[in-house]
Image: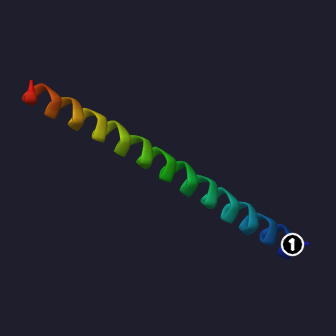
Amino acid sequence: MLKSCLNNTIVNFEKKKREIKCTLNANTREQGNQMQQMTNREQGNQNS
């Protein structure tokens, strides 16, 4: 009984960890895109 409960907890934890990792990756990509856009804008300002 206790063992199956523990197994469920571990499985749920692993799932949650994967979800968090996906979210983090998405956020990092999003931030990278924003940084790139800002850099492009700054370079555009310097060129004009």
Q: State the residue in front, 8 or 16.
A: 16
- Residue at 9% across / 30% down in the picture? 47
> Who's the residue at 74% across and 61% down the image?
12
Per the image, the residue denoted by label 1 is 4
The answer to which quarter of the image holds residue 36 is top left
In the drawing, does residue 39 fall left or right of residue 3? Answer: left
Q: Tag 1, which secondary structure?
A: helix
Quarter-wise, where is residue 43 in the image?
Answer: top left
Quarter containing the C terminus? top left
Q: Looking at the picture, how far across and down is residue 15, in whole percent?
A: 69, 60
**x, y percentage for residue 14?**
67, 65
28 above or below 11?
Answer: above
Percent position (x, y) of residue 20? 57, 53
Q: In the figure, 17 relative to 34: above or below? A: below
Depicted 35 relative to depicted 18: above or below: above
> Hey, which quadrant is residue 35 in on the image?
top left
| Observer-nearest of 48 and 41 | 48
Circle 1 Cα neighbour tier, 10 Å, few/some/many (<14 / 14–19 / ≥20): few
